[in-house]
Image (cartoon, rainbow, N blue to C red):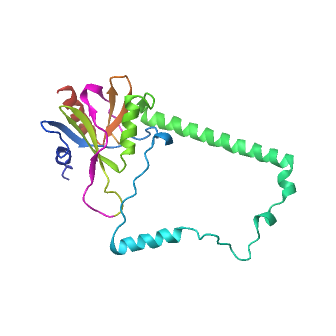
Amino acid sequence: MPKTDHATPCRQFLHPGEVLREARDYHEYPDLPPVPAHLRAPRKRPPRAKGLLGKLSDILDKASQPSAGAVTPGRPSDSRLLNNRLIDNRMTRAAGNVAENLNEAQDNIEDALDDAANRALFGKTMEGDWSSMAGRFLVQVSNAGGSPRHQALTDRRLFVLTDHATGWREREPELEVAAPIQLSNIAELRPRPRMTFPRGRFDLVFVDGSWLALCCSFQEDMQALVTAFHGR
């Protein structure tokens, strides 16, 4: 099976005089921390398709919107369904609060167990807060949208390319630079190979001490990027 060409797409985004050292696949490493809501950029809505697909999309949009003021015939109003005396009863409210707290505690325990299992499986994936270089890099990649496909190392910077041609229809890639980082801001590409897929983990270590887990699908691709960085 022929290997995917990552170099050709990346060359389109080189600056004048910039030299491409290495280009490999970008595989999003599992269990990266989610970007907080206040740092997320609003998603751009893709342009409406023309022709039959566009009309079908319009019909589905309209069908999914509830009719204004629509009332189901013969359905009793909420006030007739609610027993105000029961709701106002202090013991009922107290029992409801206890049940809610128990459910919340159970959810917290399950989340903690999931987090512990992921840490055991994938290890720590980021060091630094959201104002650190690692945090800002992850925010950039996340806010770029699309699907990250390629990562490239040049004689000046490391950058990730994301593809906005997503969805069920196959079409030409719509690539965009998601997160360029000057080499002067990178302290190290630290290899962290794994025995299970994805095998090509490495840590992008910044000069401020923060770091983020990046990944290629396979160890040989990760090693090529690391070697290109340290041999520059």
Tag count: 0
Q: Position of residue 130 (x, y in %)?
A: 44, 32
Quarter where residue 18 is shown: top left
| Residue at image coords 37%, 29% | 133
Question: Residue lying furthest left in this view?
Answer: 17
Q: Position of residue 80 (x, y in %)?
A: 81, 66
Among all residues in the image, which is located at the extreme front?
68
In the drawing, does residue 8 fall left or right of residue 49?
A: left
Does 149 sit above or below residue 193? Answer: below
Which one is in front, 86 or 3? 86
Nearer to us in this view, 53 or 199: 53
**Which corner quadrant holds the C terminus?**
top left
Q: Nearer the viewer, residue 82 or 223?
A: 82
- Rendered view: 100 above or below 121: below
Percent x, y for residue 20? Answer: 16, 38
The answer to whether 22 appears left or right of 143 in the picture is left
Q: At 42% from the left edge and 31% from the top edge, which residue is drawn?
A: 126
Name the image quarter holding residue 69.
bottom right
The quadrant in which residue 203 appears is top left
- Residue 128 in view here: yes
- The residue at the far bottom in this view is 73
Instruction: Decide whether residue 28 is among the magenta residues.
Output: no
Question: Is 46 situated above or below 26?
Answer: below
Say which residue appears at 85% left-offset and 51% top-offset: 88
192 within the magenta span: yes
* Observer able to see residue 187: no
Q: Which residues are magenta?
A: 169-196
